[in-house]
């Protein structure tokens, strides 16, 4: 069985969180949900101040500036002190797959960061997440699971990027290296 931590960043992500939790447990994950009541709790989890699984799903909304937290307040990506060494993070928040988000997560020790650069339709995000979780159990490989889940999304705005930590930078979608 694999462990999964879901971080529900705001009350606007509750239905998504419940859907992912139910499906992930059905697939065999031991799922822990962190229902957040403040932006400080979100910051503390991403700063590694509380134990979370090696596989993390961020159930949130997002924009170019950051994540939407409680009361829809934007938590700027630059305000986060990320310390999640060795983790794989899947963010469902819109625009959280932009390069500045990926840089922050990779610099914070994350091995794999997956998120949409644009504004995917909500059902697309859910289908991507569930397919990724299913395929990672089957394939035991983040890249292969991302590839399989990506084949379901045909609209450009629905695309999720995969950023992977490399010695002096990060690899984007398995084919383009960026220096940190």
Image: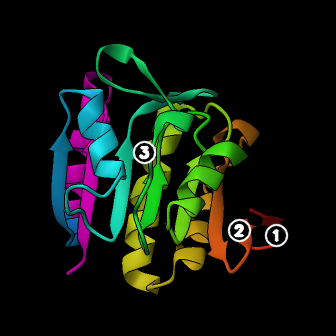
- Judging from the image, what secondary structure is the residue with disc 1 in? strand
Whether tag 2 and tag 1 are in contact, CB under 8 A, the answer is yes
- Image quadrant containing the C terminus: bottom right
Q: Is residue 14 magenta?
A: yes
Residue linked to disc 1: 177
| Residue depicted at x 42% and y 71% | 85
Q: Is residue 43 magenta?
A: no
Within 10 Å of disc 3 (Cα), the crowding (few <14, some 14-19, many 20+) is some
Q: Position of residue 25 (x, y in %)?
A: 18, 62
Residue linked to disc 2: 170
- Image quadrant containing the N terminus: bottom left
Quadrant in which residue 156 is drawn = top right
Within 10 Å of disc 2 (Cα), the crowding (few <14, some 14-19, many 20+) is many
Residue linked to disc 3: 126
Q: Position of residue 13 (x, y in %)?
A: 32, 30
Left or right: 30 as drawn, with respect to 20: left
For discs 1 and 3, the disc positioned in front in the rendered view:
1
Query: What is the magenta range?
Result: 1-24
In space, the residues marked 2 and 1 are separated at their CA atoms by: 6 Å
- Judging from the image, what secondary structure is the residue with disc 3 in? helix
């Amino acid at each position: 069985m694999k462990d999964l931590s879901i971080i529900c960043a705001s009350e606007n992500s509750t239905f998504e969180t419940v859907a992912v939790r139910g499906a992930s447990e059905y697939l065999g994950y031991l799922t822990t949900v962190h229902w957040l009541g403040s932006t400080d709790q979100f910051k503390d989890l991403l700063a590694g101040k509380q134990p979370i699984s090696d596989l993390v799903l961020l159930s949130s909304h997002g924009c170019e500036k950051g994540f939407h937290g409680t009361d829809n307040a934007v938590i700027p990506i630059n305000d986060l002190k990320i310390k999640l060494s060795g983790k794989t993070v899947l963010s469902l928040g819109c625009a959280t797959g932009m390069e500045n988000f990926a840089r922050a997560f990779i610099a914070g020790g994350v091995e794999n960061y997956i998120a949409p650069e644009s504004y995917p339709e909500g059902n697309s995000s859910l289908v991507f997440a569930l397919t990724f979780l299913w395929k990672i159990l089957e394939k035991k490989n983040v890249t292969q699971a991302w590839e399989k889940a990506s084949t379901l999304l045909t609209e450009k705005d629905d695309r999720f990027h995969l950023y992977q930590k490399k010695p002096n930078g990060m690899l984007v979608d398995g084919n383009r290296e960026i220096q940190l």
